[in-house]
Image (spheres, helix red, strand yellow):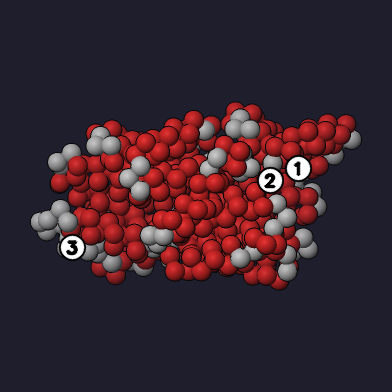
Amino acid sequence: MRALHGPATAALADARARKQTITAAIAQAQLAAALGADDDVDGTTRARNSAAMLLARVPGAPSPERLEALLWLGLVDWSVLGDVRAARDRLARAAVLARGDEHAEIALATLAIRALASSIAGDLTGAATTAREAVAVARASGDAALLTLALAAQTRQRTVHAELTGAVKAGEELLALRSQAADLAEFDAIAAWAVAPALLDSGELERCAELLLPATTVERLALLLPQARASLLHTRVQLALARDDLGDARRQLAMLEALGFARTPLGGALAGVTAALVALADDRPLNAEVRATAAAEAARRAPSRLLELGATRMAGAAQAALGAPEVAAERFAEAEQIARSIGAHARAELAARERRALGGDLGAQAPTAEHYGLTPRQLEIAQLVAAGRTNREVAATLGISEHTVNTHLRVAFARLGVTRRTALASALQQRASA
């Protein structure tokens, strides 16, 4: 990606000289990606904004060029700036254009990145559908490099959803493509990013280490964009803690926190969750609680329901370690509610077990949508609004239109007997305890 810097700068100058606005927008977006590879968040932000303004000046640009510009901008939003909302918006528009595009690599890249952004946002159903579509496009192309990218996205998506059997299966198919890779170093970095978390969650620590350790050297990390670097370092910390190597966990955390990506909302949330993990293992529960709470707030800004879930669970674990079981139970209950609202049933059950382990009457399952007199989608939207989200934020989180949010919200208001957004939280609480 760094190799783009020179060509993108030259292409941008040429396009401006020729007054080719759409070409300039593409070159400017590519320059943003190159700056991102150098961990220059400020420079990337400026280049991204310039590219977006150039693109807005040519609404009638031909579809192939517009698609390429949107893809590069979505890549930068997701992989460098950690702006999940902007990435999902651009990639949703790109996906519409991609379905009619003859270039499989552009369509595939759009689908793969969109699946990852949807997963982290909490749109698990949409992410699974998009990942399957990406694999189908790659298989139809017969291109091993494209299939590598698609399977990497699907492996990550399934791991995030706690579908470990499916994740490992997709990961094994991905690893089998190594013999067809043109660049083994790049392939190994992508494979580690995609497959190592699935192996770790499956308890295969040695296989995880075989993939992960070579990929997390400074040289190998440089092959990836910041979001992937941060994810690999997070997994490396988890592996170190699973092997009782607190020293290595601290070293990898320091590398993660030194990334410019850690200054973005998404990167800050990931770094915060990772720091909370290390603090708990290091018997510093107060520090863990502070970092987890800050991570949850950063996740809400991204927005990332998935990282908000992880941070809230970590806050619960920290409160339990501090000897505050009632507060811990509240955090685990919040985590369970978040997990159920996005359909992450395995993670919801984990939070419920953690809550029940604290004793008392805290083990009751969260009420179903039917208990509230709502559909699952209506309840999901009502819970997000009750938590303080705007309609636009809810739409971005769930990957639906604001009009759809408004429609569901009106029905939820009527069924819960409220007329104001501020009354939703108490109405839901009363209905839950009924």
Instruction: Classify residue 28 as left or right of residue 246.
Output: right
- The amino acid beneath tag 2 is Trp
Locate the C terminus and report the quarter of the image it occupies.
Answer: bottom left
- State the residue at coordinates (19%, 45%): 320
Residue 364 location (% of width, % of height): 18, 63
Per the image, the residue denoted by label 3 is 364
Q: Earlier in the sequence, mark 1 or mark 3?
A: 1
The correct choice, above or below, for 110 with respect to 278 in the image is: below
Q: Earlier in the sequence, mark 2 or mark 1?
A: 1
Q: Nearer the viewer, residue 111 or 432?
A: 111
Instruction: Classify residue 412 as left or right of residue 148.
Output: left
Q: Label 3: how many residues lie within 10 Å, few (<14), some (14-19) or many (20+)?
A: few
Residue 235 location (% of width, % of height): 45, 48
The correct choice, above or below, for 200 with respect to 234 in the image is: below
Write down the quadrant of residue 236 in the picture: top left
- The amino acid beneath tag 3 is Ala
Residue 403 visible in the shown view: no
**Outermost residue, left side:** 360
Q: Tell me the tag on residue 72.
A: 2
Residue 24 location (% of width, % of height): 79, 38
Q: The residue tagged with tag 1: helix, strand or loop?
A: helix
| Distance between the alpha carbons at the discs numbered 1 and 3 | 53 Å
- State the residue at coordinates (70%, 52%): 183
- State the residue at coordinates (25%, 46%): 317
**Outermost residue, right side:** 18
Q: The residue tagged with tag 3: helix, strand or loop?
A: loop
Q: Tell me the tag on residue 26.
A: 1
- The amino acid beneath tag 1 is Ile
Q: Earlier in the sequence, mark 2 or mark 3?
A: 2
Q: Are marks 2 and 1 in contact (CB under 8 Å)?
A: yes
